[in-house]
Amino acid sequence: MRKEDVPQDKSSLGSASFKELCYAVDENGEYITAKSTGWNPKKIALDNAIQEINERTERAMKRVVNNETSPIEYYMELNKMDVSILSSYVGVWSWRVKKHFKPSVFKKLSTKVLEKYAEVFNISVTELQQIKE
């Protein structure tokens, strides 16, 4: 695309100072870099992804309130993680993380394990244990 055609649509990233670096062609046909504030197709895709994340987080919160899952699943969703990412940060197998989603198992977790999760989520153990809607 030509330099003057680099899209300057409003971005969902929220910061007016944030610009994405793109390649464009100048008036001499040479490749150059140009800054873009965003473009609509990317904005739509980003908005859809953020909406999906928010819905998953909300569903996880409801499941915690209904005692169907542990707060670990909620904080995992809130921090935009999946089981494999969370297990690598905490240093336990994925199947153990899934097991920790069970409220009965979560209540029996040692302080040491809870501290690992709390550290990953950047919260206190108390916040992890006493989740609020």
Image: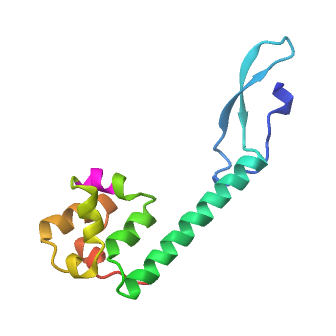
Is the residue 101 above or below the residue 25 in the image?
A: below
Is the residue 57 above or below the residue 63 in the image?
A: above
- The percent position of residue 64, horizontal first and vertical second, equals 38, 81
The quadrant in which residue 25 appears is top right
The quadrant in which residue 78 appears is bottom left
- The percent position of residue 105, horizontal first and vertical second, equals 21, 77
Q: Would you say 70 lies left or right of 2 here?
A: left
Rendered residue at 29%/74% (across/down): 128
What is the magenta segment's predominant secondary structure?
helix
Rendered residue at 25%/69% (across/down): 99
Q: Which span of residues is magenta-colored?
A: 86-90
Q: Tell me, what colour scheme is on the image?
A: rainbow
Q: Does the magenta stretch include residue 94?
A: no
Q: Is residue 87 magenta?
A: yes
Rendered residue at 23%/76% (across/down): 106
Label total for image? 0
Q: Would you say 56 lies left or right of 71 here?
A: right
Q: Would you say 46 lies left or right of 55 here?
A: right
- The percent position of residue 58, horizontal first and vertical second, equals 51, 76
Rendered residue at 35%/80% (across/down): 131
Is the C terminus in the top left, top right, bottom left or bottom right quadrant? bottom left
Residue that sits furthest to the front in the current view: 95
